[in-house]
Structure formats: structure tokens, C-alpha cells
Image: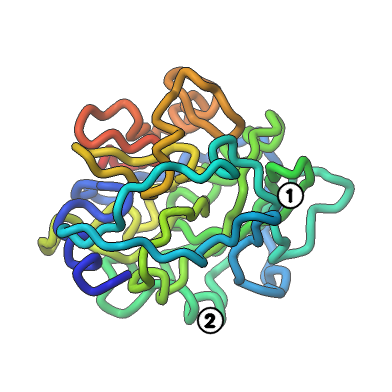
Amino acid sequence: MHLLRVVAFAALFGLAGCSTPGQPAPAPTSTNIPVTTTTTPPPVTTTTPAPAPAGWQIGAHPLPLRKDGFGEIEPTPAVLRNRSLSTADILPPPANGQYAATINAVPQSVLARSTWQAACPVRSTDLRYLTMSFWGFDGKAHTGEMLVNATVAQAVTKVFGELFAARFPIEEMRVTRTEELSAPPTGDGNNTSAFVCRPVRGQTNWSAHAYGLAIDVNPFCNPYTKGDLVLPELASAYLDRSWKRPGMVLAGDATVRDFAAIGWSWGGAWQSPTDRMHFTATGG
């Protein structure tokens, strides 16, 4: 992101527009989805974003900047209007296409490529590194990774187990990298992620993401809007919620209910901003 964009990003709301969270809520202890807790997570083979099919390369087209520092809002490219890009495996796919999840302390190698730093409002020891199975838009089972607050780790693996059982498609699930916070805006990202260490509205309060207490699901399919701003900037085609496409989160659907069952709320129910990608344990 250009420096101006970074300033505006913090000053408005950050990507997901979260408000100041309170103390981390205790995670539910019951679960119907078996979770395997291991001491050593599977090796990460790559952290490169998923490749796009012929005709589109994700992250290859920086957008002109608006006066507020965000990218110009441009029409959605035809290949992305009904988005179904393939997923690149960063971890070994689940065996036999069955849901599997692990919960671990965050490996130092993962922490080093994440956005965590000493100034963040959560200690690294209070985060957990999750691996979870998900179905891609390519119809294949994949394994993703996520950093969340330790208090919600078990509940999050339960929710994504439910999404896997329902074959809800997710394009990408990986830990947000530090360099992404300062990269030029391209408006085509679709990474499902949780922990990102960033503030809200340019103040000293932090986003719920900075505590590992919020998750953005398929951001391109579920864009953030406030006034004339759309994030990601090329996702305007997904503002038509009557055109139901894979990966969308809609009011009252199973995804909203699954998160509500663990006490999380949905930003798509907000009026201004409307944050369709955003689920939060803190209400902000």
C-alpha cells in the first residue's frame, strides 16, 4: 500500500472497519468437530498467493490512488464477476478429503512472516496457529492456515468444520504478511484471514483483527462499503446480493448462523459501514 493509503486505511477503519474491542471473550468449550492438536504443524511449502487462471493475475495490476489513499474503484473485470479461481496449496491437502484441523503455539517462522510485532495489543504467546481444511472454488479440498486469539481457537476450528461439511467454497486461507500492509492496492485479493496487527481510525485503539478476534471471509465475494468506497476496489460486481454466487455470505444463511452459534456477530448487518466479509467476537 502507498503510504497515503496506509494513513487513510488506519484513519477510516482498516480493511474491515472494526471498532475498539473489549477484553477477549472466553471460547466455547463444546465442539462437534474433532480437532487434532499437535506440537509440530505441517511444514509450510509456500506463502505465495493463489494463481489465477489465464486472463487474470492476482496482484499484478496496481490501481491509481484516490485522494483518500485507497485505490480507484473500477468495474469488476469479467473474469472476476463470478469468481471461481483455483487455489494454490500452501500446505498438504487433507487426507481422503476429510476435515482436519490443528491448534498450535505460533511457530517462530510463521510469526516472522506475519504482521505481529512487539507493539501489538496481544502477546504472540496468546495467539494460536491453526491449520484447517477447506473446499476451494476448484472443487478440491485444501489446507489453510490462520492466526487467532487462543481464547477462540477451538471455536474457530468448529465453525470452519461446519463450513467444510457444507462445502462452502473459500479461495485462499493464509497468514497475512507484513509487506501486504504497504503494498500498492490492486483491489483483487480474496484471502480469508484473522489476525492482522493494525489500528482503527488513526487512534490508539486497535482493530479486533489485532487481537485475533475477527475473521474476514472471502473479502472479494463479500466487500466492505462505506459511501462510495468499495473494498476490495474491484469487487463492485458483488454488491448485487440478489445474484447469488459461490463464496458469498448472505443475511440469515448457514455461515452467519455458524458464527452466531459461537457468539460472533456479522459486519454485513451493519449500516455504515457494511462489512460483509467480517465476523467478530467483540462486536466491532
Quadrant assignment, res 279 = top left
Q: For the point 46% across and 42% down, which residue is it?
A: 76
Q: Is residue 101 above or below residue 135?
A: below
On screen, residue 107 versus residue 184, left or right, reads: right
**Where does the image place residue 209, in percent across and percent down from the top left?**
34, 55
**Where does the image place residue 1, in percent across and percent down from the top left?**
32, 69
On screen, residue 44 versus residue 268, left or right, reads: right
The residue that label 2 is drawn on is 108
Q: Residue furthest right?
A: 96
Q: Tell which of 116 and 31 is nearer to you.
A: 116
Q: How far apart in space, not on screen, are marks 2 and 1 (Cα)?
A: 23 Å
Mark 1 residue crowding within 10 angstroms, few (<14) / some (14–19) / many (20+): many
Quadrant assignment, res 179 = bottom left
Q: Is residue 86 above or below residue 112?
A: above
Q: For the point 17% across and 52% down, which residue is it?
A: 12
Q: For the point 43% across and 52% down, which residue is it?
A: 151
Q: For the point 69% across and 54% down, which residue is it?
A: 53
The label shown at residue 61 is none
On screen, residue 235 versus residue 81, left or right, reads: left
The label shown at residue 100 is 1
Quadrant including the C terminus: top left
Determine whether the residue tagged by mark 2 lies in a helix, strand or loop: helix
Q: Which amino acid does the dot numbered 1 rest on? A: Ala
**Where does the image place residue 171, in percent across and percent down from the top left?**
62, 48
Q: Which amino acid does the dot numbered 2 rest on? A: Gln
**Where does the image place residue 121, in percent across and percent down from the top left?**
26, 66
On screen, residue 94 versus residue 114, left or right, reads: right
Mark 2 residue crowding within 10 angstroms, few (<14) / some (14–19) / many (20+): few
- Indicate which disc, 2 or 1, sits on the residue closer to the N terminus: 1
